[in-house]
Amino acid sequence: PIHHIYNIVVVKKKMSPAQFPTTDGTCAGRCSPTGTGLGHHVAGSSGGSALSGNILQINVASVNIKKIDLKAYGIEKAICQTVLTVEGVTQKTKELRGLDPIWEENFEFAVSDPKTTTVSAQFFCEGKQLGDTQVYPLEKLLKMKATFKAIFVPGGKVDMMFTALNFGDEEAEEENDSFMDFL
């Protein structure tokens, strides 16, 4: 009998989400968790974007809700998560335990029209939304300048930074203080 011996070489290579093709030929890094949309989640530090056009990067840094009365909201264990939605594409942070978790997660979204597009942000603790859905317009963002935003929730806030990667004004408009001339 003839015996075949095969040498199999396995090469382990770390790949970014954008390098994983989907069945329709697009890349998985450009899809939301539902498999549709143009959201791109990049955990940790930011790298090159797999998206094209107007790109918004949102860094969800941390939350501090140490002043909340968990019992008043029917929460036994604080398991926190932030949810962002831009033009129908929803991205979520990891669920982390505690009253002051640190995510430091970056999310990228394609933005069709920065003058009319908004970001909706929600905060959840143990699956229950705390506070209102916050809505942030993008028209005042400066190109490549991180702008602080927060989701205010009972007992604290979620800290975020919005950066218009390739849209927005280069510099802030000067304030018109001509009304001071009459004083």
Image (cartoon, grey):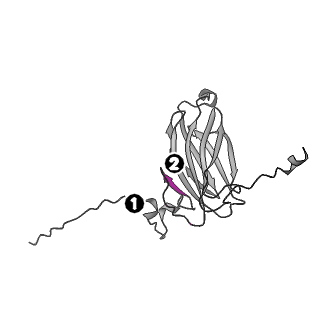
Find numbered disc 1 in the image and state the secondary structure of the residue it sits on: loop
Where, quadrant-wise, is the C terminus in this rendering? top right
Is residue 132 left or right of 64 when viewed as pictured?
right
Q: Main secondary structure of the magenta part?
A: loop
The image position of residue 113, as x and y in percent, is: 68, 63
Q: Which residues are magenta?
A: 38-52
Provide the residue designation for mark 2.
105
Residue 171: mark in rendering: none
The image position of residue 114, as x and y in percent, is: 68, 60
> Hey, what amino acid is under mark 1?
Met
Find numbered disc 2 in the image and state the secondary structure of the residue it sits on: strand
The image position of residue 121, as x and y in percent, is: 64, 47
CA–CA distance in space, label 1 to label 2: 18 Å
Task: Identify the residue at image location x=26%, y=62%.
Answer: 10
> Hey, what amino acid is under mark 2?
Glu
The image position of residue 175, as x and y in percent, is: 78, 52
Assess disc 1: are there few (<14), some (14-19) or many (≥20) residues with their C-alpha within 10 Å of its C-alpha: few
> To which quarter of the image does residue 156 belong?
top right
Task: Identify the residue at image location x=85%, y=51%.
Answer: 178
> To which quarter of the image does residue 6 belong?
bottom left
Provide the residue designation for mark 1.
15
Q: Is residue 76 above or below residue 45?
A: above
Is residue 98 left or right of 123 when viewed as pictured?
left
Q: Nearer the viewer, residue 41 or 95?
A: 41
Q: Is residue 128 visible?
A: no
Q: Is residue 48 above or below residue 75?
A: below
Q: Is residue 86 visible?
A: yes
